[in-house]
Amino acid sequence: MNYVIAETIKTRRTILSYFIFLAPVINVILCFLMAGSLNIQTFELYWWSTFMIPALTALFCSEHERQNKKSGNDKMLYTYPIDLYRFRNAGIAALSVKLFWVYLAMAVVSVVSTFFLGVLRISYGVAVGSYLILYICSLWMVPACLLLSRYMNIYILLCVHVVLNIMLPAFVADTPLWVICPYSYGPKAIEALAGIKVSGDYIAPQGVNLTVLIAVALSLVVFPALSIWESKLYNRGFFEKRVKSR
């Protein structure tokens, strides 16, 4: 728990904190300009899942790595008696919590904007539930982006992550292969729950069905698996630094 608190404090006054409030507002403004008031509610959800989620996750993870290097962690950690496996897991947990607050803010802003515009395509409960499901289905992106951020700068990571999040679901979401593609978990769940297809078209929602349950279950398996793998790779990398420094 102390590791998580330390990682949270480290990024408290960085750009990450500002994006908790800015990202939802930017999303709503862009969706209003592109889709108008009639389709803003569904377009907010579509744009959030397609573009904002991968972009924000890549940004948060890249900024986290930058803060590590800025504070000297990459040079000093292997000289201290710190459990690096737990340290990396704490970083993943801290980023996941920050992203949760972003999703919560987006759900609130979406409900408020829909209320004032007076156009309700899906119920408020379904809308809030959809953002919660999207959060669960995108948690795996945190350890994945942390891993990639050690080898890619922020611009390359943003481009790669956003493009993959657009292209892969378009190819596999309507095939049985979606179950082995984590990028498809969120879009498949939202298609069933809110009636928003991968293409952005609106269809009749089916509610919570087997597809939603499978997507959530797979996400809850992939996230800890990737977190463990990334933490072990991180620990191994610092172990190699210890050996070379002797």
Image (tube, helix red, strand yellow):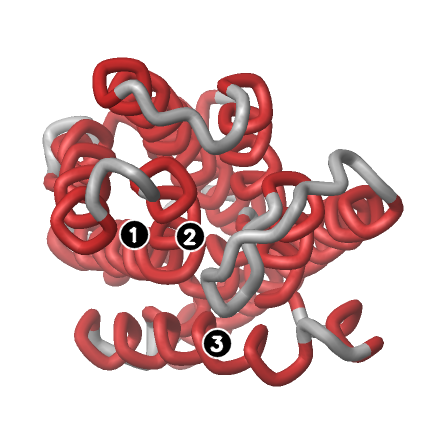
Residue in view at x 24 percent, y 61 percent: 75
Q: Between disc 3 and disc 1, whose residue precedes?
A: 1
Q: Find residue 173 and report its horizontal and vertical position in percent.
A: 67, 72
**Image height of 207 relative to 62, above or below:** above
Badge 2 is on which residue?
46
Badge 3 is on which residue?
240
Residue in view at x 45 percent, y 68 percent: 147
Q: Which mark is residue 105?
A: none
Res. 45 visible in picture: yes
Residue in view at x 59 percent, y 26 percent: 126
| Of marks 3 and 2, the one in the foreground | 2
Res. 77 visible in picture: no
- Alpha-carbon span between mark 2 and mark 1: 15 Å
The residue closer to the viewer here, 179 or 40, is 40
Amino acid found under the numbered disc labelled 3: Glu
> Dot 1 surroundings within 10 Å: few (below 14), some, or many (20 or more)?
many
> Dot 3 surroundings within 10 Å: few (below 14), some, or many (20 or more)?
few
Dot 3 lies on which element? helix
> Dot 2 surroundings within 10 Å: few (below 14), some, or many (20 or more)?
many
75 on left or right of 209:
left
- Alpha-carbon span between mark 3 and mark 1: 31 Å
User: Considering the image in quadrants, where does the C terminus appear?
Assistant: bottom left
Whether tag 2 and tag 1 are in contact, CB under 8 A, the answer is no
**Image height of 47 relative to 198, above or below:** above
Badge 1 is on which residue?
56
- Alpha-carbon span between mark 3 and mark 2: 43 Å
